[in-house]
Amino acid sequence: MNNKLVILSIAALSLTACKKEAPKQDGAKPYPVVNVEAKNIVGYQTFPATIQGRVNNDVRAKIQGYITQVLVDEGQYVTKGQPLFRLETNILTENAAAAKAGIGAAESTIAASQAAVNAAQVEVNKLKPLVAKNIISDVQLQTAQANLAQAKAQLQQSMAAKQQASANYKGVAANIEYSIIRAPISGVIGKLPLKVGSLVGPTDQTALTTISDTSQLFAYFSMNEKEYFDFLEKSPGSTMSEKIKNLPMVELQLANGSIYSEKGRIEAITGQIDATTGTIQFRVAFNNPQKLLSNGNSGSIRLPKTYDNVLVVPESATYEQQGIVYVYKVEKDTAKNVVINVIDRIDNMALIKSGVNKGETIVAAGIGGLKSGTPIKKQPVKMDSLVQSIKPKF
């Protein structure tokens, strides 16, 4: 019995010795880390924009009539003066023929009146020497002179009648010309809401179509009052015209997310707040050499913001609690959370004003379960490869 107790005691001591001699397991987990860098960063403010042609001209009929021909199609490019529509001209043609006949009748009347003037003048010329020689009385000469004056008055009336007939003909001819509705400017045809057989006129509320000059386009966007004053403070120049002149070129992001190949320039700012929306409107001019953009397109204006030599960290390295942003700075293989002041977030990077210094090491990603004071194993990664690997989620 005593021998058994001795054996058990020795076994217990051996197990205790084994436990004491077993190596401790290291609890530090590996985390990717990066060094804080200073970069030159270009970011963009985006504003929804509507796009309009440089000139948008409504096409309307100058006379009333039925459309007999539509000579163009929607989206077609037309040149100034090109026929677009034809209106019926049957009545106008009849009126033109009648007006032309009126000119002929007036010319015949003028010829007769001129003949009467000539005859009356001959009579006056014949009587004047006879009166001078007292062969005939002065009464006959006065009568002849009165007839001459009357003939001349009739001639004037005939000539006035011809002028009126000519004016009537010109008016009818102009209406016939107006029956061919031509393009007032060169540009692209918009919608064609009215078809052959539609009755149109100069007082119609609906235009026959709209022609847009899209060789250059205007994009309109708005800023609220705060954005506007921030914009003015950061724009170089002492006057509004100087600020506009010094503004950088802007980009247009199309509805499909692509960036338009031509850059634009801000040309005008209304300078007056819209009482309804509380915004101020900007106008940007874009060239459109390939005619890819059209009147009515939409998109977003990208206004560049440049940061020179600014501290950056990956956005994946930051987290927020109660409106305060933190990163985990690594000191002696231990992660410690520190408060940072973020001034902007661009391309998966947080731009830092204060809280960390250039060259300091921070935990780059996977910080969801990390706590301040936790030991870690550093696994250095490159910041550029890290931020470029982050895909946007929609």
Image (cartoon, helix red, strand yellow):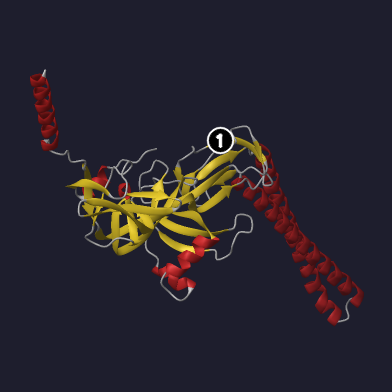
Count of numbered marks? 1
Residue under the point 73% across and 54% down: 106
Question: Residue 311 location, x and y as percent?
Answer: 29, 60
Left or right of 178? Residue 249 is left
The image position of residue 242, as x and y in percent, is: 44, 73
Task: Estimate how packed mark 1 is, as few (under 14), some (14 to 19) or many (20 or more) residues with alpha carbons within 10 Å.
Answer: some
Residue tagged by mark 1?
69
Which residue ends up furthest to the top in the rendered image?
1
Q: Quadrant of the C terminus?
A: top left
Q: Is residue 234 left or right of residue 307?
A: right
> Which sits in the foreground, 212 or 140?
212
Quadrant of the image containing the N terminus: top left
Along the line of sight, which residue is nearer the eye, 80 or 96?
80
- In the foreground, 356 or 94: 356
The residue most toward the front is 2
User: Which residue is at a point 7% across and 20% down the rendered structure image?
Assistant: 3
Above-or-below relation of 189 to 267: above
Find residue 271 and report its image quarter: bottom right
Residue at 35% over, 58% down: 340
Q: Is residue 115 visible?
A: no
| Closer to us: 95 or 127 | 95
Residue 48 is at least partly visible in this image: yes
| Relative side of 208 to 20, left or right | right
x and y percent of residue 254 in the render?
A: 40, 45
- Above or below residue 26? Residue 184 is below
Secondary structure found at label 1? strand
Q: Is residue 352 above or below residue 183?
A: below
Which three-letter amino acid code belongs to the residue tagged 1?
A: Gln
User: Outermost residue, bottom direction?
Assistant: 133
Q: Is residue 176 left or right of residue 306?
A: right
Image quadrant where residue 352 sits: bottom left
Residue 386 in the image, given as x and y percentages of width and height? 24, 46
